[in-house]
Image (spheres, helix red, strand yellow):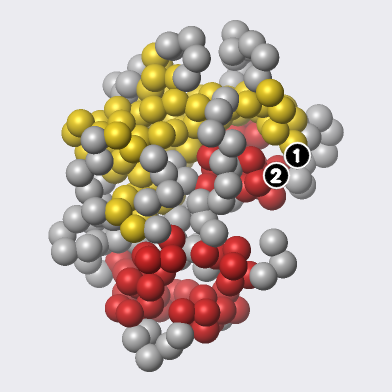
Amino acid sequence: MNDPVAHAKSYPFPVLGRSYVYRNGQPEEMLDDRFDRFGRWPVLAAGSNQSHEQLARKYSMLSGHVEIPIQKGELRDFDSVYAAHLASYGSVPSTFFPSVGTRVTTYVLWLDDIQLNRMHETERNYTFDHLHDVIVETDGGGEVLSEAYAYTSKVGCVNLAGLPVALGEIQAHGRVLPSMSQGMILEHIRERLAPAEALDAFIIAHIENNDVRKARAAALSEDAIFPDFVRTVVAEF
């Protein structure tokens, strides 16, 4: 997308709404979910990593054949919420947060080692965690995963009157947390940090000025809410 402001506002970007295979920049139909998983890590996508367009941006720099099986599913007792920072491209990104009774849409990315290392490079301000005791129900065959991996925000979640804020664009059943669209959360943060600025100017300043990014990150961290759930931190970035 050539318009950086429109790009920032469009997070978490378009999704297919079904399982698929990402193959060399394009989504293709998943004909068989019994693919070979040897050497692949099941990584749960909380936000933009659900989007084939975002994956194309992240993996376009890899040479050779790139193929990633991706299963759509639901993660139980969690929701996808806004992290307490803004990405360098101006969007408010996401992280998982425990939420009893909620079933949030996720996509399981089965990444090989090279693909996982590339994903690590794009996930700054996150830890890479092993989730030992989760329930992920995948579409189609009714498969249930009891363990997986996910990225968790190191800086916590946006605080709205003491609660995290769920991503309105990510579907969830039994959602109990307040939710906002990307445009709404950007307006909320703009009003808090720069009430005199128009939203588009707020986004442009964030994209273009590293000092502005640092100051905003520090301000959002002051009352951030940190997720608390069982996990093993494998790496942090």
Q: Residue at x 69, y 50 (%)?
A: 57
Q: Amino acid at mark 2?
A: Ala
Q: Is residue 234 above or below residue 205?
A: above
- Taking the view exactly as shown, the residue that stands out farthest to the left is 162
Q: Quadrant of the N terminus?
A: bottom right
**Residue behind mark 1:** 25
Residue 163 higher or lower than 234, as above or below: below
The amino acid pointed to by label 1 is Gly
C-beta proximity under 8 Å, tags 1 and 2: yes
Horizontal side, residue 176 vs residue 152: left or right: left
Q: Quadrant of residue 231?
A: top left
Q: Is any atom of residue 82 visible in this view? A: yes
* Residue at image mark 2: 56
Q: Position of residue 182 (x, y in %)?
A: 43, 60
Q: Position of residue 65 (x, y in %)?
A: 81, 30
State the image quarter where residue 86 is shown.
bottom left
Q: Who's the residue at 24% across and 53% down the image?
A: 178
Could you tell whether 54 is left or right of 193 in the image? right
Which residue is found at the position 26% from the left and 46% from the top?
Answer: 227
The image shows residue 13 at horizontal and vertical percentages of: 56, 51
Q: Could you tell which of marks 1 and 2 lies nearer the N-terminus?
A: 1
Residue that protrudes farthest toward the bottom in the picture: 196
Bin the neighbour count of mark 2 within 10 Å (Cα to Cα): few under 14, some 14-19, many 20 and up: some
Q: Position of residue 27 (x, y in %)?
A: 70, 33
Q: Residue 138 occupies which quadrant of the picture?
A: top left
| Residue at disc 1, secondary structure | loop
Nearest the camera: 60 or 160? Answer: 160
